[in-house]
């Protein structure tokens, strides 16, 4: 019987399940959005139970489709919103607090105090990261110190921590597997990326008991077997990677120097640096790109906190568009941005600024400013931020001539062309743009023998369209100068 790989893509705004055949082609996609909670300024939470029920719902839809197609599921791959933090009871599985989302900035003051105490150099040397509320470690600390009785329970070994992949594996296996992969572990502020283990100094600094932590596996590994009572059958979970690393795999960026950028809720640019964990001089992060058969491949990453989330804000917050698809025609209806700039620092600024206290602003509003202008400024802001990331990689010594792009936003042709114009390099959109889910499927397929090697995966990658720069240098420089002026105005640490 022919086989599918089931890929779970648990993202910031929705949970999805996709089926891929043995050639890596998508055959089915089910998706459910879930609620975003904003209890205070800069706070972002999800209900873990809603994450679980939406994930379970789309997985069951995918399994129904597979059975209808008379195909078996060879394995499950999981990719997830990274850094989002969940703590639960080991006995009951009950969560002790809402999931604190990667965008959340509540621990900004704690991070600032740790920096003032001189700890950031040690943290960066071990983790490749900065002391920023983005990462999981300070979120764990907050839960332990701010939810009644939780620290005492954690110190007794009664509780478990996990990023979303780990939480889903725990639930899918009926509590038998408390495991994660090296990419998700590398985003916690607790994992030594050079020694590939949880680090005692980092645990002591953030006051996190080691008993909370999961076991760390390669990205293609035996993570556990799903509970038959849950899904009606036992299926191996064989591939796991955080969403951006999964996209790196899905884009087949297996050679040092290859670079991809993913446009989802946020935007994340990742450069493969091979076996070397390079240190950026321009506030990019050093991270685990993937780990296969015990061999770690590293990457430099630039993180933008708000990309597609800004379009969602236009739709749900302001109500000026009914769907993301409308944004392309509105932006294309204008001959220029007419001096309007949106800096979407809704939850601070990520790379290369790392300013958690910055907040969003719109500059250049006139009486003629309307929905089309605001939509275009929002789309442009994603491209401007991408330029800042690419420029940081260039200053670190990278000279990419092509950028592979993916994610929901890249269906917008206007956005892709403006991106190429602004970056001044060829932008490649693959035939399969859902490369995050595809990367998780590839990893699971590697583990169960459907794909033989990274080279086998790379041979399957296909470009659907190239976007070639067409903007003159003068126009590009003027636009970027005005953008950088706007960014300076919202920064608090400039």
Image (spheres, rainbow, N blue to C red):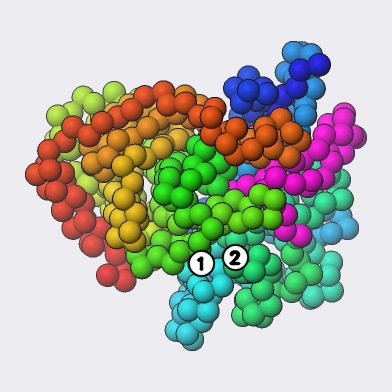
Q: Are marks 2 and 1 in contact (CB under 8 Å)?
A: yes
* 240 falls in the magenta region: yes
| Image-based side of 179 in relation to 36, left or right | right
**Outermost residue, left side:** 474
* Residue at figure coordinates x 19%, y 50% from the top left: 480
Which residue is identified by label 1?
128
Inspect the magenta stretch and tell me whether residue 180 lies in it: no
- Is residue 299 positioned above or below 238 on the image? below
Q: Is residue 253 left or right of residue 453?
A: left
Q: How many badges with numbers are in the image? A: 2
Point out which mark residue 317 bears: none
Q: Is residue 13 visible?
A: no
Q: What residue is at 33 percent from the left and 35 percent from the top? A: 427
Q: Nearer the viewer, residue 324 or 77?
A: 77
Image quarter in which the N terminus is found: top right
Quadrant in which the C terminus is drawn: bottom left
Residue 101 rendering spot, x and y as whole percentages: 57, 54
Residue under label 2 = 193
Q: Residue at (44%, 28%) from the top-left corner?
A: 430
Front position in the image: 187 or 257: 257
Q: Is residue 291 visible?
A: yes
Q: Residue at x 74, y 33 (%)?
A: 449
- Examine the image and state in which quarter residue 28 appears: top right
Secondary-structure class at tag 1: loop
Q: Is residue 141 left or right of residue 413?
A: right
Could you tell me residue 349's position as x and y percent?
A: 37, 59
Tell me where the magenta segment starts and ends, as one range.
215-242
**Towards the viewer: 134 or 397:** 397
């Amino acid at each position: 019987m022919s086989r599918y790989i089931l890929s779970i893509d648990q993202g910031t705004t929705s949970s999805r399940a996709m089926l891929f055949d043995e050639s890596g082609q998508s055959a089915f996609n089910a998706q459910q959005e879930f609620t975003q909670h904003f209890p205070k300024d800069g706070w972002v939470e999800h209900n873990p139970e809603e994450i679980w029920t939406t994930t379970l719902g789309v997985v069951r839809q995918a399994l129904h489709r597979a059975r209808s197609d008379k195909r078996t599921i060879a394995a499950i791959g999981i990719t997830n919103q990274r850094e989002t933090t969940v703590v639960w009871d080991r006995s009951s599985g009950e969560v002790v607090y809402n999931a604190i989302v990667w965008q959340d900035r509540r621990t900004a003051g704690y991070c600032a105090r740790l920096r003032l105490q001189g700890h950031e150099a040690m943290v960066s040397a071990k983790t490749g990261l900065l002391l920023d509320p983005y990462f999981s470690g300070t979120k764990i600390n907050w839960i332990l110190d701010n939810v009644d009785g939780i620290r005492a329970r954690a110190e007794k070994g009664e509780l478990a921590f996990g990023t979303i992949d780990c939480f889903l594996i725990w639930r899918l296996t009926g509590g038998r597997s408390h495991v994660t992969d090296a990419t998700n572990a590398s985003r916690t502020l607790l994992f030594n990326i050079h020694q590939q283990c949880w680090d005692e100094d980092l645990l002591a600094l953030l006051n996190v008991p080691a008993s909370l932590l999961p076991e760390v596996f390669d990205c293609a590994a035996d993570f556990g077997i799903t509970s038959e009572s849950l899904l009606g059958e036992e299926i191996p979970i064989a591939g796991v990677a955080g969403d951006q690393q999964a996209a790196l795999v899905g884009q087949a960026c297996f050679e040092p120097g290859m670079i991809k950028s993913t446009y989802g809720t946020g935007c994340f640019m990742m450069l493969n640096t091979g076996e070397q964990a390079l240190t950026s001089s321009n506030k990019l992060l050093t991270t685990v790109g993937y780990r296969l058969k015990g061999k770690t491949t590293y990457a430099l990453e630039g993180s933008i906190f708000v990309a597609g989330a800004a379009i969602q804000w236009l739709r749900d917050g302001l109500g000026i568009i009914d769907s993301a698809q409308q944004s392309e025609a509105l932006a294309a209806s204008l001959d220029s941005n007419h001096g309007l700039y949106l800096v979407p620092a809704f939850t601070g600024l990520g790379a290369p600024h790392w300013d958690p206290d910055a907040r969003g602003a719109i500059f250049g509003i006139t009486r003629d400013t309307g929905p089309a202008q605001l939509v275009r400024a929002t789309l442009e802001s994603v491209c401007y931020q991408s330029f800042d990331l690419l420029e940081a990689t260039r200053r670190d010594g990278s000279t990419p001539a092509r950028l592979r792009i993916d994610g929901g936003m890249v269906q917008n042709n206007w956005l892709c062309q403006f991106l190429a114009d602004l970056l001044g390099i060829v932008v490649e959109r693959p035939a399969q743009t859902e490369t995050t889910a595809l990367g998780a499927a590839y990893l699971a397929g590697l583990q169960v023998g459907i794909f033989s090697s990274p080279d086998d995966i790379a041979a399957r990658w296909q470009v659907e369209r190239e976007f070639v720069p067409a903007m003159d240098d003068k126009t590009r420089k003027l636009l970027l100068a005005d953008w950088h002026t706007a960014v300076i105005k919202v920064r608090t640490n400039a």
